[in-house]
């Protein structure tokens, strides 16, 4: 396989990739959990704290103006990156989890009534299941699961059937963090809207792997985390259509989200500030902004191509070994950047531990998808997931190192 | 393989051929515990004679560390009192938190697990069997209280 042009350029941007682990060069194949940070992101955060640090939207002095400008220009960059027309539809949160909790709580409170149904899928991360379970308990709503097919996809034919009875919300992941399946957002949104049902897209895994175009897709909500897109931890995004923002009550209350506070009652600021109570993740915003600009510099389409090439390479290798069981779609065009498998008769924890001894970082466990793992009939899987800096030789190293696991546990 | 590999021969031996594997028919105490990090599951059944543990069986759906721990533990606690068995587990807990490589004589068979000090996320795998024992003891306590 030819080396993708991205590698020779991008790899040097990441200081951490210079380090060794257990005497081997680090092969970081756990990008579905978090991504490494390019120097430009680290520098942007350092620069903020060294030169511009202040609280935002409050002070009148120079630093406060600069910090506010940096914070709000970050919002513009996010809007631009995800194809939102208006930066006021971008809410800064702490991550995907908080973004989804915000909708479940702030939109749910105003919209859910006892007996309402919401649809979610069997391939959701716990962060897109548990908030709805809590909402189900609080508001008496019913959770309806859209099943995963044996090939690790959503059965599109079944959606109309699920929507035949009234539904309040459809929430689904754009890319499965275990199966790597790509769910067709535009098509799903179109069908849901035809039934008058709003959709929430969890794009935590998708946003670094393929273009995001919220206005084109017409989705109602979209959530993702900064740290999975080469940005810092502690920051995430909730995009919500203006109409939906108007339907939401405050999520958390306190400073920064009010227009007036009296002794016994208060008025709220307008969105997005209405949903950003307290001091927001100010220092993280320039980091996220730099990360999104970094991706835009190389082009998200290039990242997508790179991801697909690595996935194809991994699948081609994987199918050569009869003792490896692959999970997820068999067709390459239905999946991206995440490849989960098991070495037969060896626990995934043991596999990951042995691989770490060769400097290979990947994840083992249920990856916060116990509902999906129950469906797959396994308690845990080994997962490799790719990023901009990975190349096929790292994947080859992983397959080679599996021999050590075979040696230890199967001989 | 690096020098501090956690897969010592003794642990692998126990993982491959676990001692006291299975389920007792009419156990005095039983407990099932799960590791929330990975979904691993361990079922323990205990036969008691008064305070004394007469027999112990475990069914493990888990990694080699979890398997080995259940196996070594079962060998250690049979013929001990439940109280003493619990004390053994807690003693090793303390050893895992200390900076040195010492272990109390009572928990010498657990020494191979000291390597987990530098693999903190695997301590939970090793602890699952001892958690099941704690759960059994807790039931025993509730029984005597009611």
Image: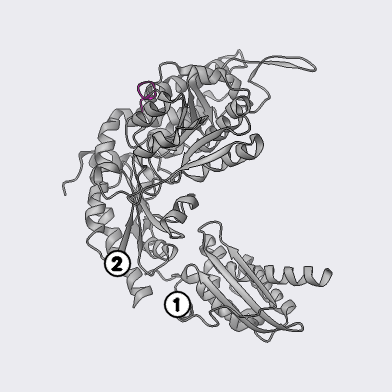
Placement of A340 over or under B95, stated as above or below: above
Placement of A171 over or under A130, stated as above or below: above
Q: Is residue B71 left or right of residue A8?
A: right
- The x and y percentages for residue B30 are 65, 72
Residue position for label 1: B12
Q: Closer to the camera, B32 or A45? A: B32
Residue position for label 2: A323
- The x and y percentages for residue A37 are 40, 39
Q: Which residues are magenta?
A: A212-217
Which is in the foreground here, disc 2 or disc 1? 2
Q: Is residue A313 left or right of residue A134?
A: left
Badge 2 marks a residue whose secondary structure is loop
- Magenta highlight on residue A213: yes
Q: Closer to the camera, B35 or B144? A: B144
- Magenta highlight on residue A219: no
Residue at x 72%, y 72% (from the top left corner):
B137
The reply to whether residue A230 is in sight is no
Badge 1 marks a residue whose secondary structure is helix
**Label 1 Cα neighbours within 10 Å, binned few <14 / some 14-19 / many ≥20:** some
**Label 2 Cα neighbours within 10 Å, binned few <14 / some 14-19 / many ≥20:** few
């Amino acid at each position: 396989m030819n080396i993708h042009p991205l590698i020779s350029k991008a790899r040097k941007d990441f200081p951490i990739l210079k380090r060794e682990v257990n005497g081997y060069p680090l092969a970081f194949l756990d990008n579905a959990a978090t991504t490494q940070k390019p120097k430009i992101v680290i520098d942007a955060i350092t620069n903020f704290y060294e030169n511009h640090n202040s609280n935002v939207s409050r002070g009148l002095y120079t630093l406060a103006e600069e910090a506010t400008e940096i914070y709000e220009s970050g919002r513009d960059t996010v809007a631009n990156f995800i194809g939102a027309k208006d930066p006021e539809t971008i809410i800064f949160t702490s991550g995907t989890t908080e973004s989804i909790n915000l909708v479940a709580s702030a939109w749910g409170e105003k919209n859910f009534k006892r007996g309402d149904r919401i649809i979610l899928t069997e391939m959701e991360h716990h962060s897109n299941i548990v908030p709805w379970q809590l909402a189900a308990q609080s508001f008496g709503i019913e959770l309806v699961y859209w099943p995963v097919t044996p090939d690790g996809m959503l059965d599109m034919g079944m959606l109309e059937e699920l929507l035949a009875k009234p539904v309040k919300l459809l929430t689904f992941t754009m890319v499965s963090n275990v199966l790597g399946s790509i769910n067709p957002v535009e098509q799903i949104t179109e069908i849901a809207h035809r039934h008058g049902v709003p959709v929430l897209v969890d794009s935590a895994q998708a946003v670094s792997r393929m273009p995001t175009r919220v206005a084109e897709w017409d989705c109602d909500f979209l959530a993702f985390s900064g740290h999975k897109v080469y940005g810092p931890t502690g920051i995430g995004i909730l995009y919500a259509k203006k109409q939906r923002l108007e339907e939401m009550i405050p999520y958390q209350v306190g400073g920064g989200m009010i227009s007036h506070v009296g002794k016994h009652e208060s008025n709220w600021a307008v969105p997005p500030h209405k949903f950003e109570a307290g001091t927001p993740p100010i220092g993280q915003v320039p980091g996220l902004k730099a990360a999104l600009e970094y991706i835009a510099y190389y082009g998200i389409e290039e990242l997508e191509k790179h991801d697909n090439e690595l996935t194809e390479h991994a699948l081609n290798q994987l199918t050569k070994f009869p003792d490896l069981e692959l999970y997820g779609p068999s067709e390459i065009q239905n999946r991206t950047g995440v490849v989960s498998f098991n070495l037969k008769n060896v626990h995934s924890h043991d596999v990951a531990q042995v691989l770490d001894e060769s400097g290979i970082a990947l994840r083992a466990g249920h990856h916060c998808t116990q509902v999906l793992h129950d469906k797959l009939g396994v308690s845990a899987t080994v997962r490799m997931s790719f990023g901009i800096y990975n190349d096929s030789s790292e994947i080859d190293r992983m397959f080679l190192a599996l021999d050590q696991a075979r040696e230890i546990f199967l001989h | 393989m690096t020098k501090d590999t956690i897969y010592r021969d003794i642990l692998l031996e126990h993982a491959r051929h676990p001692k006291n594997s299975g389920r007792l028919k009419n156990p005095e105490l039983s407990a099932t515990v799960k590791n929330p990090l990975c979904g691993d599951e361990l079922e323990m059944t205990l036969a008691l004679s008064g305070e004394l543990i007469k027999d112990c069986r475990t069914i493990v759906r888990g990694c080699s560390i979890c398997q080995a721990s259940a196996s070594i533990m079962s060998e250690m606690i049979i013929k001990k009192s439940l109280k003493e068995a619990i004390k053994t587990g807690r003693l090793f807990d303390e050893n895992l938190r200390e900076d040195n490589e010492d272990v109390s004589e009572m928990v010498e068979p657990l020494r191979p697990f000291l390597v987990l000090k530098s693999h903190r996320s695997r301590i939970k795998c090793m602890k699952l069997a001892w958690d099941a024992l704690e759960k059994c003891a807790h039931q025993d306590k509730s029984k005597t209280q009611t």
